[in-house]
Amino acid sequence: MSRQPYVRPMPKASWYLGNARYRRYMLREVTCLLVGVYCALLIWALAALSSGSPERWGAFLAAQQNTAMVVFHALALVYYLVYMTFDWFKLAPKAMPVQFGEQKLPGSVIVIGHYVAWIAVTLFVLWLAGVLQT
Amino acid sequence: MTLKTRQLELEVLRYDPEKDSEPHFQAYSVSCPEDWAILDALNYVKENLDTTLSYRWSCHMMVCGSCGMMVNGEPSLTCKTFIRDLPDKVRIEPLQNFPIERDLVVVLDDVMDKLQRAQPWIIRQDDPPPPDVEYNQPRAALYKFKQYTMCINCMCCYAACPQYGLDPSFIGPAALAMAHRYNLDSRDQGKSQRLDILADHDGVWDCSFVGACSEVCPKSVDPAAAIQQMKVDGAIEWWKQKLPGGKS
Ligand code: SF4
Ligand code: SF4
C-alpha cells in the first residue's frame, strides 16, 4: 500500500473570504492601516513642531482643518474603538487571569479595571494638555 | 416512544491515494434518528452502504479525540456534533490544514512532533527526590492549569487556526497550551527551558490572537488564552535576560 497524502493548499491571498470568523478577524487587523496613517500624521506634526517655524506648524494645522480630515479622524476613532479597544479589553482576562487562592477573579472585574484605568489616563492627558481646568 | 428520524444528505470527501489524483465528494442518503451524532451517521454508512469509507474514531464519548472532522466547514468532534443541530445537507471533510491520508483520515505526524517540542512532562532542575516521596501540590496550584489538562489532542484547533494553515512551521495552539500547562505547574521547573523554544519565531509570536482555536475547542481548553499568557511570560523572561545581572 503506498502513501500519497494529499495537501490542500490555503489560498494565500483569499483565505479569509470564505469564513465569517476569519473575515471578522481581518476587519480587526485592518486597523493597522489606520494606525499607519495616524503615525504618518504624527510624524508630520512633530517635524513641523521641531523645525521651530511657525509657518510649517501653521501649515500642518491648516491641513487638519478641512472636512475630509475631520471625517477621517472621526471614522478612525470609531473604527479603532470598536475593533481594537473594545475587542482587546474584552480579551484581557484571558491574557492576564488573576487567581486568589482557589478562586479566579471574574473576568468582568478585570475588564472594568481596564476601562477605569483608560478613563483615568485620558482625563490626566486632557488635564496635562490644559483642556480640563482645575 | 420512537424517535423521529430525518433524511440526511451527507456529502463526504473521499480520497484514495492509490486511485485518485485529487479528492472528490461522494453523496450518501441516511435516515437518522434525531439523537444521532454525525459519527453515528458515518458508522451507519460504513456498516450498511459503503465499507470502503475510512475515518478515525474510538470512544464515541469525547475522550479519545480521534473523530475530529470538518462538519459544514467547522472543525468538530463528530461524536458531539448532533444531527438535531444541523441542516438536512451536511458536508463532511477531513480536518483542514492537514494532508489527507485517505478519505477522512489526516496525517498528524507534524503535530505529534510539535507536541514533543513542547516538552509536556515535569522537568526538574534539582536532584530527584527519594523514590518514596511525592511532589505535593495544593489545590489552588492545580486550579491554575487544570483547564489546560482537558485537551484530548483532537486537533480541531489546528484545523481552525489560519496561522497554522498559512505557515505550518507555527507550533500551534494545542502544543503551546500543553507547554503552558506544565509551565504553570507548581511541581515543574522547566519553564525557561520551554520558553527558549516556544517564545521564539514559530512559537507564541506567530499567533495573532485570531481566537478561532478557542472557539472550536470541544473541551473548552482555550488554547488562545494559554498562548497570550505565554507571550507575557516570554516577554518577562526576555527582559530578565537583558537586564544587568540577569542570566544570559
Ligand atoms: S486544545 Fe481543544 S481543540 Fe485543540 S487539540 Fe486540545 S481539545 Fe482539541
Ligand atoms: S489564537 Fe493564535 S493559535 Fe489560536 S487560532 Fe488564532 S492564531 Fe491560531
Image (cartoon, rainbow, N blue to C red):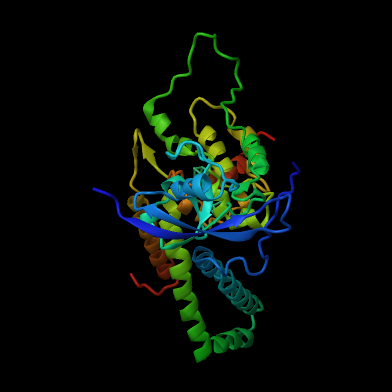
User: Residue B121, how many percent across, how many down?
Assistant: 57, 28
Quadrant location of the N terminus of chain A in the rendered image: top right
Number of numbered discs on residues: 0
Identified at 44% across, 43% down, the residue is: B219
User: Residue A39, how many percent across, how many down?
Assistant: 60, 72
Question: In this view of the protein, which residue sits in the foreground, A81 or A22?
Answer: A22
Residue A56 in sight: yes
User: Residue B155, how many percent across, how many down?
Assistant: 55, 45
Identified at 51% across, 40% down, the residue is: B65
Considering every residue shown, the one lying at the far left of the view is B1
Question: In this view of the protein, which residue sits in the foreground, A46 or B234?
Answer: B234
Vertical comparison of A20 with B133: above or below: below
Vertical comparison of A118 with B186: above or below: below
Q: Is residue B183 left or right of residue B6?
A: right
Vertical comparison of B31 with A35: above or below: above
Identified at 44% across, 46% down, the residue is: B40
Residue B241 in sight: no
Question: In this view of the protein, which residue sits in the foreground, A71 or B21?
Answer: B21
Q: Is residue B105 left or right of residue A2?
A: left
User: Residue B141, how many percent across, how many down?
Assistant: 42, 30
Identified at 59% across, 55% down, the residue is: B96
